[in-house]
Amino acid sequence: MRRGLGGLIDLLLPRLCPICRAANLTSASAECCADCSAQVRPLPAGCCSRCALPFVADAGSSHRCAACLREPPPYSHVYAAGLYDGSLKRALQLFKYSGAVDLDRFLAGLLTPLLSCLKGDEILVPVPLHPRRLRRRSYNQSLLLARVLARNLQISLDRALLRRIAATPSQQGLDARQRAVNLQGAFRCQARLAGETLLVIDDVMTTGATLSACSRALLEAGAGRVDVAVVARSPRHGTG
């Protein structure tokens, strides 16, 4: 009876793709339409082995980029599901700025297979929002992603370990150095750590300034290793 009722509802009120808002979803389990899903570009094999920055000439090699060789970031590795463009960029913008919280399963689902190599003793740590920004937005998109990932991977999540203590201006339009200066002292770890392996979760990585600031705060508190997982990686170290 429940399946029949669900079928009737889908017939009378067909679900629209949450990304393009045009195509009907033909499957009850589909999170987006086939066209939008096909436009998600995975991260190329040729990218930095430390920060996952895609190389301009993709020869399939994986080595450190010039920036990571010159100044190694505090995190050890970045997992990224795709490039920040096309339908993935649209989905993340809707998710982050337009209240499309129903995209959390789709976006976290893109990242889940990459994290299947985890041992299980890692702790997920979402990038926190300052309370003022959280009140304006009403939700933290990084926490929503981390919750789905914790369920999918059956590993621990600590939503309160990291706190944003400075209400810094928006990062949009700033270059890498300006972003790093903007975030100095912006995060604080709320507990003394004892060598734990932590995985910081965020939606998008551009210059890496935010994730570096989070990682640094956790390492200074005693973390043994900090890795990063993001749904999308910007194809350049710019201001995107």
Image: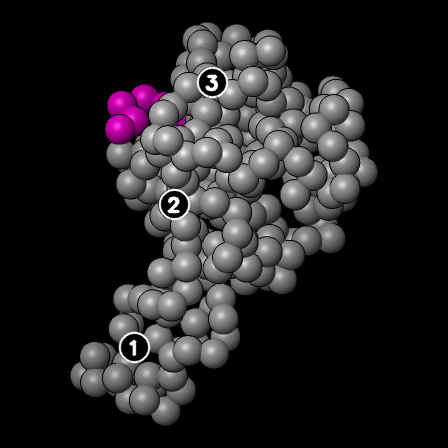
**CA separation in Å, label 3 and label 2:** 19 Å
Q: Nearer the viewer, residue 155 or 171?
A: 171
Q: Nearer the viewer, residue 171 or 195?
A: 171
**Which residue position is annotated with label 1?**
26
Which residue is painted at 51% across and 21% down in the image?
65
**CA separation in Å, label 3 and label 1:** 43 Å
Locate residue 49, reporting x and y percent. Answer: 42, 22
The stretch of residues the image draws in magenta is 117-125
In the rendered image, the quadrant that contains the C terminus is: top right
Amino acid type of the residue that numbered disc 3 sits on in the rendered structure: Arg
Q: Is residue 218 visible?
A: no
Which residue is painted at 28% across and 81% down in the image?
6
184 sits left or right of 204 in the view: right
Q: Quadrant of residue 184?
A: top right
Local SS, label 3: loop
**CA separation in Å, label 2 and label 1:** 24 Å
First in residue order: circle 2 vs circle 1: 1
Which residue is painted at 38% across and 68% down in the image?
35
| Magenta stretch: helix, strand or loop mostly | loop
Amino acid type of the residue that numbered disc 2 sits on in the rendered structure: Pro
**Which residue position is annotated with label 2?**
42
Q: Which mark is residue 64?
A: 3
| Nearer mark to the viewer, of 2 and 1 | 2
159 sits left or right of 77 in the view: right
Locate residue 187, reporting x and y percent. Answer: 67, 24
Instruction: Determine contact: label 2, label 1, CB under 8 Å.
Output: no
Q: Nearer the viewer, residue 139 or 216?
A: 216
Local SS, label 1: loop
